[in-house]
């Protein structure tokens, strides 16, 4: 099971520099800091934003009043020195010298490998910076426009050295003013994408592909129409991924994906795709909605990335008040598929810094929340072994609060675990029939891995009518069964 810890590299190194009273780069991060990052239960670290950022993109951002307002909201004492440019406005896929350059990254990867942890890095397939070398050397790799396009839609096109290019975009939002759109239908672009990903695979164990669904043939055709030219016979990712894996067979491909295209992208070669649908259900809907989501095909679920926050979403501590975050965290941590944790989430940070910033505000850590996650991560590692199964819950004619309970089991070669979450703001009771017939006729000992509390129960009762559960609002059991 893949468990990813996302780190905002630029902000993190800046804070480490302040902590140690010297400039800290990827090549000289102290050993105890890598231990803090590679927590028990973490097997993959995503160093977000290591590539060379664009001065041209930064200049555009500094003229954008709406962006500047968002920066000030996140960092009230903002100075111009705090604005580094977007991590997703990539000038070159070379590790930024200010972060330690390629040698620093290689050292960081080695230190993570010493701890049994893989490294993943970003790839932005949809767009590049306005000063990326391709704009002058390979314009055929980009979506181009005319002077008339620029005059008619100055918000959607830009002039670079007298050449008109389209700004990068998602079809449902305004164009991004600091990036230039690549042409997913260009044969030359596809070859270059393979080369770029092979280079990333030389430096890392995996790649997180930004907005991966934008490159799919049908999506791209709807977004760009005739400007892109005719769609190739092969879709983008089925062309690119096998050619990259010819060089790096074990490279982990993770897709940022939306619009219910996760299954399609899994079929096109991705190991894991964002489970945004579960995120939305946990934030805005009830236990029944989540239970319905978890009835999906298990092969599909194993290819999802469960998360409560990342650099694009608000902080969990700001959107999931109090005990609800703990209930949601137990849920995502103990499901099949990959789990994504965001640096700062464990300490209860509430401010999400925009990816343009090199600094974030100081926030006091929530020590109780940190202790909770310190128990949850290793517990989830112990639990997620073997076969997963969604369980039913039952109640009584005068009490249907069992509908608030989510329950599933994990059956390993020599382990059995049971997870029950009251995903509601009211106390809830129910019975959970367990899926192990051989419990019949035996006493059973249950241990809650989060609290250490133990329970002795009769095996026959655990099968029919099931384990009786009485949980306060937003509380959970993570039980080993022996």
Image (cartoon, helix red, strand yellow):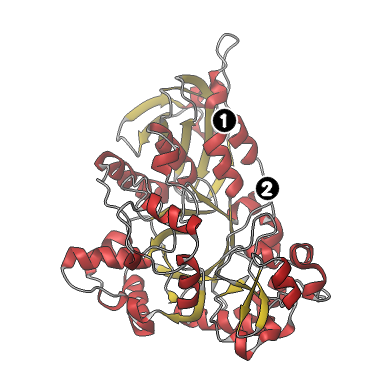
Q: Which residue is mark 2?
A: 297
Residue in the image at 46% along x and 54% along y: 310
Q: Residue at x 71, y 59 (%)?
A: 264
The residue at which mark 1 appears reads as 286
Count neighbours of disc 2 (C-alpha within 10 A) and say few if under 14, some if 14 to 19, many if 20 or more.
few
Image coordinates for residue 194, horizontal then vertical, percent: 62, 81
Depicted 219 relative to depicted 111: above or below = above
- Answer above or below: position of 445 versus 71: above
Upstream in the sequence, badge 1 or badge 2?
Answer: 1
Disc 2 is placed on an element classified as: loop
Q: Position of residue 415 (x, y in %)?
A: 44, 45
**Where on the picture, by quarter, is residue 453?**
top left
Q: Quadrant of the C terminus?
A: top left
Q: Residue 197's x, y, as percent?
A: 56, 79
Relative side of 309 to 83, left or right? right
CA gap, disc 1 and disc 2: 21 Å
Q: Is residue 31 something one can see in this rendering? A: yes
Question: How many discs appear?
Answer: 2
Residue 170 or 45: which is nearer the viewer?
170
Residue that protrudes farthest toward the left in the picture = 21
């Amino acid at each position: 099971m893949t468990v990813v810890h996302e780190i905002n590299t630029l902000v993190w190194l800046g804070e480490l520099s302040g902590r140690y009273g010297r400039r800290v780069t990827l090549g000289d991060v102290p050993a105890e800091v890598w231990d803090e990052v590679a927590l028990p239960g973490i097997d993959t670290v995503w160093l977000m934003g290591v590539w060379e950022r664009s001065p041209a993109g930064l200049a555009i951002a500094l003229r954008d009043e709406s962006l500047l307002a968002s920066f000030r909201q996140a960092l009230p004492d903002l100075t111009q020195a705090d604005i580094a440019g977007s991590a997703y406005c990539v000038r070159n896929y070379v590790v930024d010298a200010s972060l330690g350059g390629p040698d620093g990254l290689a050292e960081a990867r080695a230190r993570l490998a010493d701890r049994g942890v893989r490294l993943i890095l970003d790839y932005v397939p949809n767009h590049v910076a306005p000063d990326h070398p391709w704009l002058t050397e390979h314009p055929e790799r980009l979506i181009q426009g005319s002077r008339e396009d620029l005059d008619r839609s100055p918000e959607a096109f830009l002039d670079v050295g007298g050449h008109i290019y389209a700004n990068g975009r998602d079809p449902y939002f305004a164009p991004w003013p600091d990036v230039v759109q690549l042409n997913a239908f260009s044969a030359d672009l596809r070859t270059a994408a393979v080369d770029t990903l092979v280079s990333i695979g030389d430096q890392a164990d995996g790649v997180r592909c930004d907005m991966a669904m934008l490159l799919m043939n049908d999506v791209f055709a709807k977004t760009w129409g005739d400007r892109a030219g005719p769609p190739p016979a092969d879709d983008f990712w089925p062309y690119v991924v096998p050619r990259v894996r010819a060089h790096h067979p074990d490279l982990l491909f993770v897709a940022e994906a939306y619009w219910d295209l996760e299954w399609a992208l899994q079929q096109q070669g991705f190991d894991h795709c964002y489970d945004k649908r579960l995120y939305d259900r946990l934030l805005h809907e009830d236990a029944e909605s989540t239970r319905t989501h978890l009835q999906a095909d298990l092969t599909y679920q194993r290819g999802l990335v469960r998360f409560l926050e990342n650099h694009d979403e608000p902080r969990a501590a700001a959107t999931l008040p109090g005990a609800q975050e703990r209930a949601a965290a137990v849920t995502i941590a103990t499901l099949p598929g990959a789990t994504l944790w965001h640096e700062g989430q464990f300490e209860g940070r509430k401010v999400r810094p925009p990816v343009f910033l090199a600094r974030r505000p100081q926030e006091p850590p929530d020590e109780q929340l940190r202790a909770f996650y310190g128990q949850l991560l290793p517990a989830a590692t112990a639990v997620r072994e073997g076969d997963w199964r969604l369980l039913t819950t039952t109640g009584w004619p005068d009490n249907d609060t069992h509908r608030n309970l989510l329950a599933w089991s994990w059956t390993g070669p020599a382990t059995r675990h049971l997870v029950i979450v009251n995903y509601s703001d009211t106390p809830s009771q129910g019975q959970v029939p367990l899926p192990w017939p051989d419990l019949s006729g035996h006493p059973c000992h249950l241990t809650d891995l989060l609290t250490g509390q133990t329970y002795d129960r009769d095996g026959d009762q655990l099968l029919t009518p099931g384990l009786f559960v009485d949980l306060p609002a937003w509380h959970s059991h993570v039980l080993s069964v022996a």
